[in-house]
Image (cartoon, helix red, strand yellow):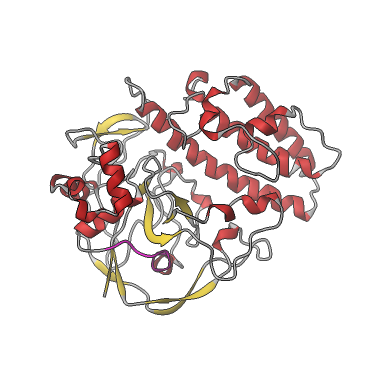
Amino acid sequence: MASIGAEDAQLQSMPSASPAKWHLAHSSWFFEQFALGADPAYVPSDADWGYLFNSYYERVGPRHPRAARGLLSRPTLRQVLDHRAAVDTRMDAVLRDPPRRLAEVVELGLQHEQQHQELLLADIKHAFWSQPLRPAWRDDLPVPPRVAASPPRWVTGAEGIVEIGAPPWPAHAAFAFDNESPRHRTLLHPHELASRPVTNAEYRAFVEDGGYREPGLWQAAGWERVQAEGWRAPLYWDEALALEFTLGGMRDIDPDAPVCHVGWFEADAFARWAGARLPTEAEWEAAAAGQPVAGNFIEAGFAHPAGAADPGTGIGQLFGDVWEWTASAYTAYPGYAPPLGALGEYNAKFMSGQQVLRGGSCASPASHLRASYRNFFHPHERWQFGGLRLARDA
């Protein structure tokens, strides 16, 4: 938060985004509600904060409308930071000897906070881009080194019956969200995956070839968005297709870096234009299974996608840089059952109208990711760090 002032933390640039101050308050509310609140004797420090910072947990109680979070000038940022410190102190005391169930809730809360760390960056980036001055999140944010993109190659994917998904947590030691389980078998038909994500240069060719003017490339709902919102390029590109807005301000577009800030409609249209398709999430996970979670994450300090070395005969950049849109709708795995109680609302009730993304991004914490991780957003949403990799039938 050192590079975000109180005025910045108040901004909400669109209904899908949240102010930085709200992210901070909500992630502490989660611990207070579900961990500290597990003690019947616990009294919240301010009963009104449950209404202000509950995100979508209907079983917990009513909440402030999402689209109006930017109106919450009170509590102040200082009060939110003080509240976070107080919750942390209480949590530290509780965790000296926690019962197993409480430890599990805390683990979920830590994973939840990592999600909001990335969401905060995506949201403040959109808020700064929406201003005429387009300020940087950090003026000293380093520029990723430029690496020439290797020629794309087709790599044969797994075929036949494979297992995907994660064993249910907490029955198994390794953490995974409930929507990643149960582990199950699925059939993969012969296919190939691109050796790397689509680059800015490749996407620019799509733009210059009239990709945003050709309705035959687009899903009907996507074409409606193109027309209604005037899409002509990825979200943060300028009209000359030379500069893009980054968390470090306006910068030259690196032609060899993965294209970023495209929605599923755009990714799907590009794939059609390229004579290919998007991979299914099962194809993606089968390719990523067993590979180390290594790449350009937030710890690298760039907060922006970067080019990578030639992966040789394998597949590169599966993790980090950009979340990769898949052809798969976000829905339940066979045999899935949501957790009981309010925490069952964490993932289960969003399994409609959204598409799955895989792999993590330049704004993701590395420790948060794994091959089975399922992210999901609506197909028109572009402000997340989303890109794409091509696939084709073999």
Q: Nearer the viewer, residue 244 or 262?
A: 262
Question: Image height check: is 327 above or below 61?
Answer: below
Q: Where does the magenta region start and end?
A: 277-284
* Position of residue 57 measured from the top left corner of the image (x, y, whole percent): 64, 44
Q: Nearer the viewer, residue 265 or 7?
A: 265
Question: Image height check: is 383 above or below 197?
Answer: above
Figure label count:
0
Q: Residue at x 29, y 52 (%)?
A: 220
* Position of residue 361 measured from the top left corner of the image (x, y, whole percent): 41, 48
Q: Residue at x 41, y 62 (%)?
A: 328
* Position of residue 200 measured from the top left corner of the image (x, y, whole percent): 23, 46
Residue found at the very far bottom of the displayed protein: 160
Residue found at the very far right of the displayed protein: 41
Q: Is residue 12 visible?
A: yes
254 relative to 351 in the view: left or right? left
Q: Nearer the viewer, residue 271 or 214?
A: 214
Q: Is residue 258 visible?
A: no
Quarter occupied by the C terminus: bottom left
Q: Nearer the viewer, residue 325 or 216?
A: 216
* Position of residue 300 measured from the top left corner of the image (x, y, whole percent): 42, 42
Please check the rendered image and state whether residue 240 is part of the magenta-colored stretch, yes or no: no
Q: Residue at x 61, y 20 (%)?
A: 74
Quadrant for residue 281, please give it.
bottom left
Question: Image height check: is 174 above or below 14?
Answer: below
Residue found at the very far left of the displayed protein: 209
